[in-house]
Image: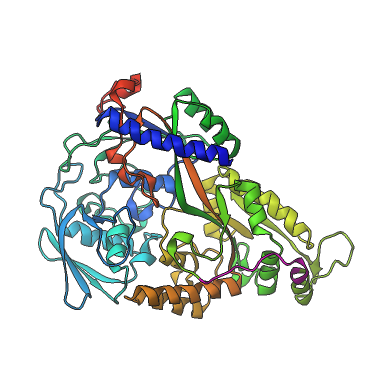
Amino acid sequence: MRRVLLLATALAACTKNDQASSGAGARGTLVIATSADADQLLPPLVITSVGKQVSDALFLPIARVGDELNMLGDEGFTGVLADRWEWAPDSMAITFTLDSAARWHDGRPVRAADVAFSFERYRSAEVGSDLAPKLAGIQSVTADDSLRFTVAFARRSATQFYDVVHHLIPFPEHVYGPIAAAELRASDAARRPVGSGKFRFGRWEAGQRLEVVADTAHWLGRPGLDRIIWTVVPDPTTQLAQLLAGEADLVEALRGPALEQAARDTGLAFVQRPAVDYVVAQFNLRGRKARTQTHPLFGDVRVRRALTLALDRPMLVRSVLDTLGDAMTSPFLTLAGVRGLAIPGVDLAQARALLAEAGFRDTNNDGVLEKDGIPLAFGVSAPSTSTGRTRMQTLLADAWKAIGAKVSAEVMDNPSMMARNEAGDYDISLLGYSGSSAASDVGPQWLSTRGSQGTNWGGYANPAFDAELDSATASIDPRSARQHYARAGQILIDDAAGIWLYEARTVMGMHRRIVPGPIRADAWWAHLDEWSVDRTRMLPRDRLGPGTT
């Protein structure tokens, strides 16, 4: 694998040379083979990575974080919908001024009232946006006139500017205002969005393909591509076959034998991205389908700790990802910069002792422990589209069998898994997170105050964790914020709220005729509007023009 990664680095360098020699080609089609369909396209409703990729092509932010990913203050941010902003003397409010040229795709101007309306929809319990917790520090958004709006904060925070411009993506009131908040998610307008980005919605064949086309008259200038197509290809082997055959232009994650095979094709280039994808085994602390009851197994912290101690996580990660992943050392990504935490390593003797202390015995010598007639048997759910997580299921089952547990692998498609998570119909769910290295992201995953919002489907609750996280997000001193995050992370580890398995680096493979723009660590698609196709290598699909779908 190390040999392949060296080759990948060399080919990535060649891509830069290609970009310099080919010039700024301004037409063409990019076909992305992706393992799952988008879940939603309207910004407050999007959860999945594919949904976010499409939504970000269709909708512009108020301002954009720089590629160095500074999230403190407003240094490095560039105005997009807004062309300027002014802080209040006490830092408890920011007044933004929209670019007067900004337009929605239907030609209507972007107005301050749209931003105020969007904020209300984001925080509406009827909408149920997963982003609502990330906007909890905002007290109000008020339209001062047609172009100026003021964001007032409930408290100061080192990331308060980032929280506004990165998470509050405006959408048009004149389109979505007439739709009741409770009906927004299922509305036709949500599936055929009117946005502000350099790409317009083209078509969406659910479960097959999704297409956006260039807005050639966009007020910020037309994008470098005519269209982007996401094709749903759940099988990684088929993804690779389509990439090698030229039917797809980009596969965003190549690993193992697929990477070895792809690296032998001189028509492909590769880019290795830092780890912003990670997987957590979330325990359901409540009864399965019985949310008012305690889970008969995982309601006991000793059982959760025992399962953690039974795992040699570095070995498991090497088995799944080889050199393209690392066992997590804390509930935070390495890029988050929260130091001084350590998840306990493997200790089978201590794991067995904890289970014995919790009252589990193998009374019938069948190899499975039980307590009061309840066996130590449970399911581990994973999406069929994730090879890494389905492989991890098998390894977890083997590791836990050694301490007397019986594990069943529950594999299903992404929508089914999401529905079961939201209903609490699982024992352990292997959750994948992607796209942000912010330490504050642990909030929506574990805060007990989030209710139905966020992904704390297991019902974890600890006021001490909530207090530390609130202190971290309220701090305007980065050093103090990291200290509070570290204490919050230690509480999660001590409570064994989940098992933080691995963070994955990814190698993205693409056709050499594609000239990529800058690739940001947390969102490789952030600059898709700057991507283009080398005119000397165009395929027939590159010459269709933006008016053809």
Magenta stretch, overall SS: loop
Give how far across and how far down residue 422 sits, in percent: 52, 58
411 relative to 497, above or below = above
x 31%, y 64%: residue: 163
- At x 49%, y 45%, the residue is 506
The answer, for residue 426, to whether it is visible in the render is: no
State which quadrant residue 537 falls in: top left
Query: Which image quadrant for residue 479?
Result: bottom left
Viewed as shown, does residue 189 lie left or right of 10? Answer: left
Q: Quadrant of the C terminus?
A: top left
Q: Is residue 307 visible?
A: yes
Residue 344 counted in the magenta span: yes
Q: Quadrant of the N terminus?
A: top right
Query: Residue shown at 60%/64% (left/top)?
Result: 284
Position of residue 156 relative to residue 329, above or below, is: below
Range shown magenta: 340-351
Q: Position of residue 411 (x, y in %)?
A: 63, 47
Q: Is residue 151 magenta?
A: no
Identified at 54% across, 75% down, the residue is 491
Depth order, front residue of 59/117? 59
